[in-house]
Image (cartoon, rainbow, N blue to C red):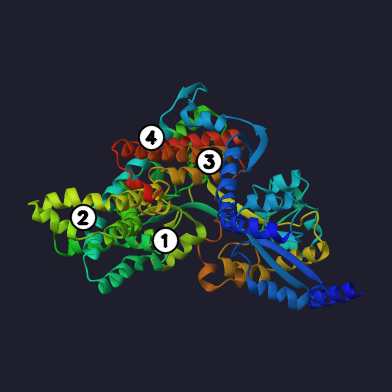
Amino acid sequence: MKTILKFLILFLPVLPALPVMADKLYVYNWTDYTAPQLLEKFENEFGIDVVLDTYDSNETLLAKLKSGGGNYDIIVPSHNFVPIFIAEGLLQEINARDMPTLGNISDKWLNPPWDRGNVYTVPWQLGSTSFTVNTDVYRGAIDTYEILFDPPPALRGQIGMFNSPDDVTAMALIYLGYPLCNESAAQMKQVRDLLVAQKSHVKVYDSDGIKDRLVSGETHIHMNWNGYSFRARQEKPSLQYAIPKEGLLSWVDNLAVPKNAQNPDNAKRFIEFFMRPRNAALQSNFAGYDSGNANATRYLDADKKSAPEIAVPDGASLVFSETCSTQAIALQDRVWTDIKK
Amino acid sequence: MKRLFNFNLPPLLSVGPAALFLTVFFIAPFAIIAVYSLMEADPFGGVRRAFSADAYIQFLFTRDWDGNLQFDLSYLNIFWRSFALAAGATVLCLAAAFPAAYYIATQPRRRRGLLLLLITVPFWANLLVRTYCWVLILRDSGLVNGWLIAFDLISTPLPLMYTDGAILVGLTYTYLPFMALPIYASLEKTDWRLIEASRDLYAGHRQTLARVVFPLARPGVIAGCIMVFIPSLGAFIAPSLLGGGRNLMIGSLIQLQFSSSRNWPFGAASALILLAFVLLLLYLWRRRSGRDGRDDGESIW
């Protein structure tokens, strides 16, 4: 009796924390990537409590789901990881085609190669990796990787590159016209030769502080993401974002529902809700990326509406980054060591 | 029972925490690294439970572009660069810290406290912020180049940033207090009458410094050198911020293997090889000072 009493006294304070059968939605998204206003609006409209948890890489997300942890209802894998999640049986079908709001998504982003028929995913945010040029210093055409890899005199010694082997080799492969995640030693050797020759013109390999270096004039051409390039141009109008004709390295993060989700119906409600133009714009205004939602543009903030960095131009040829095999990564690591040994 | 307690607990209590600390924070992580270095790499990062010595082979041998295994100096070269920069930083720290420590040790007791406090002040700010300040000082549009141009000494900015020299400045700046404090600790205990005696015996300034002051400071100098050299070897922030990532250092090599190269076994092996190098170096150092018939290192080891 005494034990039971003790037990009760010990656990009484915990009781209110137990679920009161309230409707919940557990969202697991990248850090600093979810508009709080969006979640608030969803909570108010549906009376569902949203709990947000964050991660910093696709690998983290994959590891957590594979170990059976989390119990999340919404996750946001990048396009190159979606096939892995599907193959591992970690996602459940959401059949987005049956959702009335899917019609808002631009044709360009529907039915993508990583999820034919939008069975498992819809786009959340999308963007690209290219480079930014100071057009006061270099006045020629900037729509080619040539000025990055074989720079004209004005840009020599003024180049900033990412300090990450995957993005740098991917860009070099696009320039040379070879497939990404290349497993051919002969082709990767050409990548090595190209990047080793480029090194004498490169000032810095650093993926942080890009905007600062571009604005201060430390570098006049720098590998960059579209969102960062947009912000850099706000501070220095001559900084233009290049859309290379050889192909624009692009990524799409997608909303998906894990197989072991506790509240799959709420998750589908959220996805449908997100694809309404006003809501997609709410998210884009927060994060500064395109949502692939054709009807959301008119609700964007004025500066983002007209930004060439944010919406992908119609004629651009897009190249989607891939998840590479072990062999491709080993070759990529060889290239990187050769550049920096 | 009670007697057993009285008898056994005190030694256990006194040794226990230290032993537990070493096991949890040193031996266990070390064992994990050693085991990981002998496993196969998993395609998405992490390791697979299969034995493989590939990581150690990769350190010295690489497949050339035709697929043949050949001896390769790339990684040894990266190690050599890191050792050279760490040694350079140690020498610079010693040159700057010794006079400073000597000066502080000769001040009146009350002033010493203030001066020591000033040496530790930089620790109050975040290392990343302090290193980034050097970027603002050294870059093309930075303070140094700005002044030189303003005084018409140069017309185009000097390339101060993104060089080995910039890394050296960053390392020296970061680890200077680690050199100054132990040297001060040795000098503080000095019996200054020894210096008077040295003068009385007609030793000049230089001789007194070389034969009396320096030997007295030796334990502090050795401790300081070790405390500067070893962290400089694995330094990560200064090389990537000030060196511009143009050349790999040991720290960035290891970091790379655990991130985009997704080769944890090789990262673990590199860390272990670094550890082996350092231990070997310390062993040689200790043996040399042992042969000299001095054991002044004893107080630190």
- Going from the N terminus, do you reach mark 4 or mark 1 first? 4
- Going from the N terminus, do you reach mark 3 or mark 4 first? 4
Secondary structure beneath disc 3?
helix
Q: Nearer the viewer, mark 4 or mark 2?
A: 4
Question: Label for residue B209?
Answer: none
Residue identified by numbered label 4: B77
In percent of the image, x 80 and y 59: which residue is there?
Answer: A261
Q: Dot 2, how many residues are within 10 Å of its Cα: few (below 14), some (14-19), or many (20+)?
A: few
Residue identified by numbered label 1: B128
- Above or below — where is A323 with respect to A274? above
- Tell me how far mark 4 sits from mark 1, CA to CA: 27 Å
Residue identified by numbered label 3: B267
Q: Amino acid at mark 4?
A: Asn
Subunit ID for the residue under disc 4: B
- Going from the N terminus, do you reach mark 3 or mark 1 first? 1
Subunit ID for the residue under disc 2: B
Judged left or right of residue B270, residue B120 is left
- Tell me how far mark 3 sits from mark 1, CA to CA: 24 Å
Q: Amino acid at mark 1?
A: Leu
Q: Nearer the viewer, residue A122 or B99?
A: B99
Q: Amino acid at mark 3?
A: Gly
Residue identified by numbered label 2: B156
- Going from the N terminus, do you reach mark 1 or mark 2 first? 1
- Tell me how far mark 3 sits from mark 2, CA to CA: 41 Å
Secondary structure beneath disc 1?
helix
Q: Check chain identity for marks 3 and 4: say if they share one.
A: yes
